[in-house]
Image: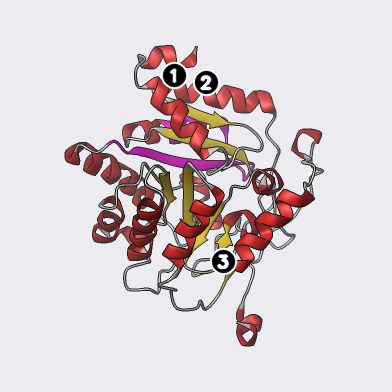
């Protein structure tokens, strides 16, 4: 890995302004014995997490509580999204032993719900879909009572690769829209809004046709330049394309080289976004400055399950 260090890049930014972070976004970094034990466990197992690679503000809390979002297929991404702190550049070959090591770590931690995401591997023949399927298989094999959520890339719109992951039947299939369509060119230049919506719709169609209980989930960030009306329109698209769970959080600029924070949304505005989403028919909208796609994922899945027995209008109560 060391001999390729000079090829790893972070994306360039169009940064113009630096906004001071408001008080409600200042998270106290956690350390302590549990936190260090978690870091050592992940290092020993040679596992990556989006918590660390993405510089998540909640990782201190999650690591201290002995949980994390595993990131498979390495720590180097084939895409150059301007919001993301994950390294980009040439990546190592996929590790066939990685799925088993994740399952063993899940067992060691005694997790009741495991969350797995990945970098994009567009250069790989199957985009890494078989690695996702194998990871789900191994988690189930060693942890039969553990639920699984996977946060997947778009596989360049290949339905065969999506079906490979769906056939492994995770409890939650997530794919993030990240931002409103107007901002895709500057925020997600190698992604397509409609392609991501199609993936979510196909997941819902497959689950319904197969009689499988599978929740469809997506997430977005605020603060990149979107408007309230654009977010509402996006949430309408989510409902029409079969999304069950939506997460909405504040974007934080990881380095000066990344996309600038255009503004910080107030907590009350996140509440308004959540209310608007539920009015549109989305059963579970998790919205707040520090909300992240995989943060409290088990609680989101369990909370959504409780709404199934209620009419949608009662889910707000």
Q: Earlier in the sequence, mark 3 or mark 2?
A: 3
| Residue 111 appearing in the image | yes
Q: Residues within 10 Å of mark 2 (few under 14, many from 20)?
A: some
Local secondary structure at mark 2: helix
Q: Which residue is mark 1?
A: 279
Picture layout, residue 44 above or below residue 308: below
Marks 3 and 2, Cα distance to the nearest angstrom? 42 Å
Q: How is the image coloured?
A: secondary structure
Q: Residue at x 50, y 11 (%)?
A: 317
Could you tell me which residue is drawn at 32 percent across and 73 percent down? 125
Judged by depth in the image, the label closer to the viewer, 1 or 3, is: 3
Q: Position of residue 232 (x, y in %)?
A: 48, 30
Snapshot quadrant of residue 124:
bottom left
Q: Residues within 10 Å of mark 1 (few under 14, many from 20)?
A: some
Q: Is residue 216 above or below residue 156?
A: above
- Identify the residue position indicated by label 3 in the image: 45
In front: mark 3 or mark 2?
3
Q: Compare residues 224 and 306 and report the one nearer the observer.
A: 306
Looking at this rendering, what residue extends furthest in the left direction?
209
Residue of label 2: 275
Quadrant of the rendered image containing residue 22: top right
- Magenta stretch encompasses residue 223: yes
Q: Can residue 17 be seen?
A: no
Q: What SS does tag 3 mark?
A: loop
Residue at coordinates 31% horizontally, 58% vertically from top-left?
157
Left or right relative to 62: residue 285: left
Q: Which residues are magenta?
A: 213-235
The residues tagged by marks 1 and 3 sit, at their Cα atoms, a distance apart of 44 Å
């Amino acid at each position: 890995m060391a001999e390729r260090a000079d090829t790893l890049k972070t994306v360039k930014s169009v940064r113009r302004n630096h906004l001071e972070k408001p008080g409600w976004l200042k998270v106290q970094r956690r350390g302590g014995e549990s936190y260090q034990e978690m870091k050592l466990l992940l290092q020993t197992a040679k596992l990556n997490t989006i918590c660390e690679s993405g510089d998540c503000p909640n990782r201190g809390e999650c690591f201290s509580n002995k949980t994390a979002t595993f990131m498979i297929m390495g720590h180097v991404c084939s895409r150059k999204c301007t919001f993301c702190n994950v390294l980009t550049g040439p990546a190592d070959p996929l590790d066939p032993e990685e799925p088993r090591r994740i399952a063993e770590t899940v067992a060691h931690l005694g997790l009741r719900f495991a969350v797995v995401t990945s970098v994009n591997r567009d250069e790989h023949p199957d985009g890494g879909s078989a690695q996702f399927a194998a990871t789900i298989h191994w988690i189930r094999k060693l942890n039969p009572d553990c639920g699984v959520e996977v946060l997947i890339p778009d596989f360049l719109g290949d339905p065969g690769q999506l079906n490979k992951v769906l056939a492994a039947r995770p409890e939650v299939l997530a794919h993030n829209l990240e931002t409103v369509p107007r901002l895709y060119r500057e925020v997600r230049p190698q992604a397509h809004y409609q392609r991501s919506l199609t993936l979510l719709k196909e997941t819902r169609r497959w689950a319904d046709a197969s009689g499988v209980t599978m929740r469809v989930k997506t997430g977005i960030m605020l603060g990149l330049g979107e408007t309230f009306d654009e977010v509402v329109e996006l949430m309408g698209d989510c409902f029409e394309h079969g999304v069950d769970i939506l997460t909405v959080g504040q974007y934080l600029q990881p380095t000066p080289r990344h996309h600038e924070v255009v503004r910080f949304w107030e907590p009350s505005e996140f509440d308004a976004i959540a209310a608007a989403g539920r009015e549109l028919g989305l059963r579970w909208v998790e919205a707040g400055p520090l909300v992240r796609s995989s943060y409290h994922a088990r609680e989101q899945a369990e909370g959504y399950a409780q709404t199934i027995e209620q009419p949608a209008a009662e889910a707000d109560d």
